[in-house]
Each structure stands twice: as C-alpha cells, then as structure tokens.
Image: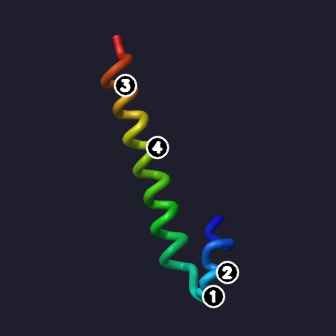
C-alpha cells in the first residue's frame, strides 16, 4: 500500500515513510495486546 501511495504522488525516498508505518504497526499491536490483557485476563 505504501508503494501505491508514494507512486501516485511521485515520492522517491520512502525510508522515513516506511519507518513511520512500521513503528505505527508495532505500537498498534502492542496497544492491542495490553488492552486485551487488561480486559480479558483473569
């Protein structure tokens, strides 16, 4: 998806966009795990 978006707006350097996307994915997964543990842990 990142390549499609950056290709449409003709961005050549995607390094920072890739790093931001992967960081956001990791933060979202970590938050989901913590919230599920808080809500559903016995």
Q: Position of residue 24 (x, y in %)?
A: 44, 57
The residue that disc 1 covers is 10
**Secondary structure beneath disc 2?**
helix
* Image position, residue 3 (x, y; %): 67, 73
Look at the numbered discs 1 and 3 and tell me whether their residues touch, using CB distance below 8 Å. Answer: no
Q: Residue furthest top?
A: 42
Distance from disc 4 to disc 3, alpha carbons, whole Å, reads: 12 Å
Whole-number angstrom distance, CA of label 1 to CA of label 3:
42 Å
Q: Earlier in the sequence, mark 1 or mark 4?
A: 1
- Asked if the residues shown at circle 4 and circle 3 are in contact, with their CB atoms under 8 angstroms apart, the answer is no
- Residue at far front of view: 8
How far is disc 1 from disc 4 in space, using C-alphas?
30 Å
Q: In the rendered structure, find residue 7 and report the number of the disc placed on it.
A: 2
At 51% from the left edge and 61% from the top edge, which residue is drawn?
Answer: 22
Residue on which the image places disc 3: 37
Which element carries disc 3, helix, strand or loop? helix
Q: Quadrant of residue 42?
A: top left
Q: On residue 32, which mark appears? A: none
Q: Of the residues under marks 4 and 3, which one precedes in the sequence?
A: 4
């Amino acid at each position: 998806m990142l390549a499609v978006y950056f290709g449409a707006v003709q961005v050549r350097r995607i390094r920072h966009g890739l790093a931001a996307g992967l960081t956001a994915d990791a933060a979202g997964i970590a938050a989901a795990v913590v919230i599920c543990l808080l809500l559903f842990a016995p």
